[in-house]
Amino acid sequence: MIPIAETLLDWYACHGRHDLPWRQNRDPYQLWLAEIMLQQTQVESAKPYYARFLQALPNWQALAAAPQDRVLALWSGLGYYARARNAQRAAQEVVTRFGGHFPNTLEAAVTLPGVGRSTAAAVLASAYGQRQAILDANARRVLIRSHAIEADPKVSATQQWLWTLASALTPEDAHGYNQAIQDLGALICTPRQPRCTACPLVNRCLAHAQGRSHALPVTVNKAPKPQRCAFFLLVVDTEGQILLEKRPDSGIWGGLWCLPQAASDGGAFPILCSDTLHPLEDTPAVRQSLQAAWSRRLGLNLQLKALEEEQQHVFTHFQLRFRCVHARVLGSAVADSSATLRWYRPADALTQGLPTPVRRILRDRSGGC
DNA sequence: AAACCGTGGAA
DNA sequence: TTTCCAAGGTT
């Protein structure tokens, strides 16, 4: 056995997170679902979603057959919603292409939507006991520090190097080793202020020997986030129902139900546009544009009322500034619901797949809680 | 290759 | 307060 692997497995036996919900059995569906939810997501964030999702959709068949809105509702708030749409497609493929069993080779597994090399390897190692190396953020950080790799982890040559390292270090018991290196990265070899004095690899760590643990992995300075601006429409019908619009499948918040949006020039889905910085002032011209655009697009005769104060929501790669616009419907003619437009009672709206800021707006309107 | 895709915790 | 970044994958 490779000394590093043996050291890590010994450490894991004593100090590992053996109580994580997805470490209680070796069911491929449950392991795969956990891997998808944990992509770019911290353990504590994923836990409640994992329990709820598994309760509602406990196997491949249930997920494959569920309405997409139900899947997105279960994912609502967790972010990166393409994961949810891809997960359902993957479940459908497991059922139709693989007879209801997660594929047992890396080549087949990575053909599933949303399953890349690391996710596939994690599932194959844990579900089927295969010797498959992972390379997630934890493993990557541990390898970069223990080998004092100064190269930019983002560039493809460095990634190839890291994959080679990961494969070489992974022992036959990849299931245990993968968990061990992830726990070391999460508990000891943390991004900032690593706890090197508690690390089982301290005597084998090149970065520590060089006094550079805190400086690795190297980071490149990032550009400031661009700003995008949008108005959100809050229109209620005579029965107190609120109008939501389903977003296109692609792009931000894909497939989620959202307050209808517009830019100050009347353009639709402004938060998909990266090159426009629309003003958010309350002027007659802006009101005219919004009123005309929404009335036409939604098939309603709207009368705009108050504009709320500006709020913001920060994404990974841009900042959204928005204002809610209250409006009422003139006359008795209310547009019918359609595939992408639907009137919801406030309590029902909150059960749908909503982006976090929209959920916050509706929750606050529903009187707290 | 580089941009895109969410949200919240931690410091 | 701002900044960083997390069990990555897709286009």
Image (cartoon, coloured by chain):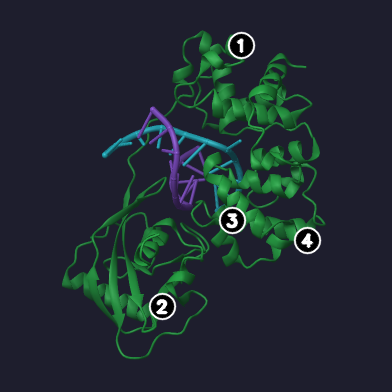
Chain colours: A green, B purple, C cyan
Q: Mark 1 or mark 4: which comes first in sequence?
A: 4
User: The numbered mark 2 sits on a residue in which chain?
Assistant: A
Of pointers 1 and 3, the one earlier in the residue sequence: 3
In screen coordinates, is A124 left or right of A200?
right
Residue A340 located left or right of residue A307: right
Q: Can you identify the residue that label 4 sits on? A: A96
The image shows residue A351 at horizontal and vertical percentages of 51, 66
- Do marks 3 and 2 both belong to one polypeptide chain? yes
Residue A267, x across and y down, in percent = 33, 68
Closer to the camera, A300 or A270? A300
- Label 2–label 1 contact, CB within 8 A: no
The circle drawn on residue A84 is 3
Q: Which part of the image, by quadrant, shows the C terminus of chain A?
A: bottom left
Callout 1 crowding tier (Cα within 10 Å): few <14, some 14–19, many ≥20: some
Q: Is residue A338 above or below residue A122?
A: below
Q: Is residue A60 above or below residue A191?
A: below
Residue A295 % position (x, y): 33, 80
**Amino acid, disc 2:** Gln
| First-in-chain label (3 vs 2) | 3
Residue at horizontal 61%, vertical 49%? A50
Chain ID of residue with mark 1: A
Q: State which mark lies toward you, 3 or 2.
A: 2
Mark closer to the chain start, 2 or 1: 1
The residue that label 1 is drawn on is: A204
Q: CA distance from mark 2 to mark 1?
A: 63 Å
Task: Tell me what residue is drawn at x 45 percent, y 21 percent.
Answer: A193
Q: Which disc, if any, is residue A241?
A: 2
**Residue at the extreme bottom:** A332
